[in-house]
Image (tube, helix red, strand yellow):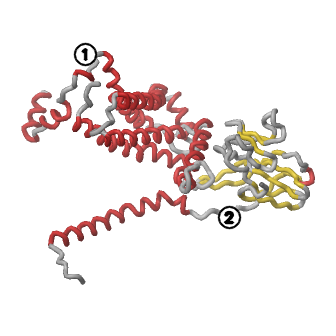
Amino acid sequence: MLNKIYDWVDERLDITPIWRDIADHEVPEHVNPAHHFSAFIYCFGGLTFFVTVIQILSGMFLTMYYTPDIENAWRSVYYLQNEVAFGEIVRGMHHWGASLVIVMMFLHTLRVFFTGSYKKPRELNWMVGVLIFIVMLGLGFTGYLLPWDMKALFATKVGIEIAASVPFIGEWIKILLAGDATILGAQTLTRFFAIHVFFLPAALLGLLAAHFIMIRRQGISGPL
Amino acid sequence: MSNTRVSRRQFLNYTLMGVGGFMASGMLMPMIRFAVDPVLEAGAAGDYIPTSQKVSELTEEPVRVDFTYDQVDGWYESEVTGTAWVYREGDKVVALSPVCKHLGCTVNWAGDSEHPNQFFCPCHAGRYEKNGQNVPGTPPTGPLDEFDVKIEDDLLYLGATKPNTLV
């Protein structure tokens, strides 16, 4: 049945080469843990992506209950965690996954550094990776405020002061982030929500696409 | 006009890019102006807020004065509490902001028992002299801000904060 559907579509749109291009490729021996177990260090990039997918999915589901409003944000998080079935699990996935993404990304960066994989011709991919790192830190920073508890509020106060210490444009950055020159409140929460849920994920997906297209085009760097 | 002839291809390129750029900026301009509005908004004039602190009771020892005022945060209005550290200096009244100039925590007078005559920030052990001067070698990069002060019927009124004028 499924085969017939596939054949029907393939006959008309010739989709086989499309997925072959994506899925069919050589995995060199030196990056395959089945050959040398120490090659597991080459898995951290893929693991970062795997956790990122979990973050995107669990985040999409969290917004079914979450409300970015200072009166209701904390209450909605409390409700989804304690009253909704599996709420603790879904929020836990997003909470722990956030830290795990940073850890995996850091290990991936170390692997690329110590195998020298950033060298010519892969410099551009390293630079895109650094941009991904910045976007990920931004996602962590903006997401931390959303539960709107004391820890979130004061961490953001400190974070915004750090942003404000940038020479010349620090004050503008601060107001752009907080939505107000002095208050960290209702407008900050809606802004951080928008940045966390729309702006940064859009940037992240674009950068990840560039990252993956480049690695596919250049192939994995050779053995040490 | 110069004599360089514009080819049909160049002409079409320029017009398409011009029209395309015009349409793109027509889309982007409202969105960007919308996003940066808080930066361009004119700051509201600071009104003086009454406190319950009697000026005649002030001494040279800084005391904590809490005051409440209506704060308008976009669409959200609320009553919030602010704090100032107030003391008398001769016949002048000084009110200092408790916001640490390092990363915005809240400082306390004599908060550290080893330095009873200084302001202390518990976050990263920043210290300030009584006039708000930051102690060299501690994290803060500048002196504590100062409130505009007004006295009416022996009651203390606090205005906007400004950079410290005492140091």
Residue density around tag 1, few if under 14, some if 14–19, many if 20 or more, within 10 Å: few
Q: What element carries label 1?
A: loop
Residue B10 drawn above or below residue A117: below
Judging from the image, mark 2 belongs to the subunit labelled B
Q: Quadrant of the N terminus of chain B?
A: bottom left
Which residue is labeled 2 in the image? B45
Amino acid type at mark 1 = His
Q: Quadrant of residue A149?
A: top right
Q: Residue at x 23, y 33 (%)?
A: A219
Q: Which mark is residue A183?
A: none
Q: Position of residue B95 (x, y in %)?
A: 80, 53
Q: Which of B30 and A105 is in front in this view?
A: A105
Observer able to see residue A50: no
Picture layout, residue A216 above or below residue A160? above
- From where the camera sits, is residue A89 visible? yes
Q: What residue type is labelled 2?
A: Ala
Residue on which disc 1 sits: A35
For this rendering, which residue is in front, A182 or A127? A127
Q: Residue at x 22, y 21 (%)?
A: A29
Answer with left or right where residue B92 lies relative to residue A97: right
Q: Which residue is nearer to you in this view: B15 or A107?
A: A107
The x, y position of residue A73, in whole percent, is 54, 40
Residue B167 percent across, percent down from the top left: 77, 54
Give the side of residue A74 with respect to residue B126, left or right.
left
**Where residue A26 sits in the image (x, y, percent)?**
18, 27
Give the distance between the C-alpha atoms of the residues marked 2 and 1, in whole angstroms.
71 Å
Residue at image coords 34%, 43%:
A207
